[in-house]
Image (cartoon, helix red, strand yellow):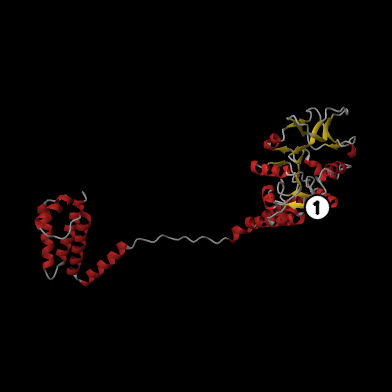
Amino acid sequence: MGKKGGVYIVIMVLTVGLLMLMQYTKPKEVNWFPSYVSKHKIPYGTVVLNDILQQLFGDKTKEVNIPPFEFLNDNSDAKGTYFFVNDQIEFGETELYNLLDWVSEGNRLFISADNFEEKLLDTLELKNERLYSGLDHMYSHKHQLVNPLLNPQKEYLFEKDNYATYFQNQGDVPMTIIGTMTNTDEDEIKTEKFYNVIKRSYGEGEVILSTFPKAFTNYFILKEENRNYTAGLLSYLDSSRTIYIDNYYKSGKSVYTSPMYIFLNTKEFKWAYYLVLIGVVLYIVFQGKRKQRPIPVVLPLKNQTLAFTRTIADMYYEKGDSKAMAEHKIDYFMEYIRSKFYLGSIGNEKEFYHNLAARSSHSPEEIEKLFSFIEHLRNRENTSNDELQKLNSSIEKFKKQAHGK
């Protein structure tokens, strides 16, 4: 490698090193993915909620890591509150009716999600609507609790979403309002209140629905006094019986099965991994070509049949055994007749001559003359060189005429 090539390598290495330094030192981006997993510390994880539940209810809580349908079938004696929090929950018809049957026996179902399946809403005679922010400027959503014991005058601000979901009653039975929300414009003019947390009786039990699942996330609870709003919602859980906390319907993964997660989630390991990859690429570019062995040229095998035949013929000729050569020549010719014209051994000579003449473009007289000469050579004890040459010429002439040449 010349001096110029070395300069290019140095420049490239310095550039890569500078880029890596810039990436390593820049602030880590906040992960706003709505996972709702109880072990995640990201803004929309629920590790803080999990700690609060343990502090408030202690051994009354039980985490469920399997689908509700499977859990309720395996635990027919389960009694209490089934607690769900996620951005979207869709049970499916069979699982939904299984849950509602369990509620009708005197249990409580608490679901907090942005969206609810139509089957659940139709069963409870409810409808979901969305409240969007304005186009000219952002609106803030303010949430309130209705219960007089939960400081209903207090408003809890949430500014991360430009829309919110609320309920409309579609039946004759009134629903119990637990929480409301409002849009407040820049001039602090309050608009209409919308119901986003409601309670509905079902059989001997109750169903509580909330369209504000982010109220249970780390970001909301740890901001200012928002924890009081979350605590107010949790007060509707029946603390006298077991609270079953769902860990199955979650948008994020609670367990990472890939070993690469350890490397890519830790800053130091991640850049060590990238350095190894960059080193491998550089090695392939600058060293792989130099270390590669030349590919040998393998010549195809030559067809030595003609050379072998000539060698054998020369051996017979030098030995002076014209009789043996004539016998071989005649045998090869008879094999040629059998394979080319599908004629076997000579039985009836006239019929054989007539068939061969018809298939080889010869007259019967020419065929009879050739085979008479062949029979003459076979009956003699010795064969001269002139006779051998005449035999060869006759056979070659026969083949040329038979092939139309």
Q: Position of residue 268 (x, y in %)?
A: 76, 56
Residue 199 appears anywhere in the view: yes
In front here: 118 or 31?
118
Residue 140 appears anywhere in the view: no
Q: Position of residue 257 (x, y in %)?
A: 68, 55
In front here: 154 or 341?
154
- Looking at numbered disc 1 in the image, what kind of residue is underneath it? Lys
- Relative horizontal placement of residue 131, taking residue 333 as reference (left or right): right
Q: Position of residue 371 (x, y in %)?
A: 12, 59
| Residue sticking out furthest to the bottom | 319
Q: Position of residue 15 (x, y in %)?
A: 73, 50
Q: Quadrant of residue 106?
A: top right
Above-or-below relation of 229 to 308: above
The residue under the point 83% across, 44% down is 234
In front here: 49 or 203?
203
Above-or-below relation of 194 to 247: above
Name the residue beneath numbered marker 1.
60
Q: Quadrant of residue 286?
A: bottom right
- Relative horizontal placement of residue 5, taking residue 211 as reference (left or right): left
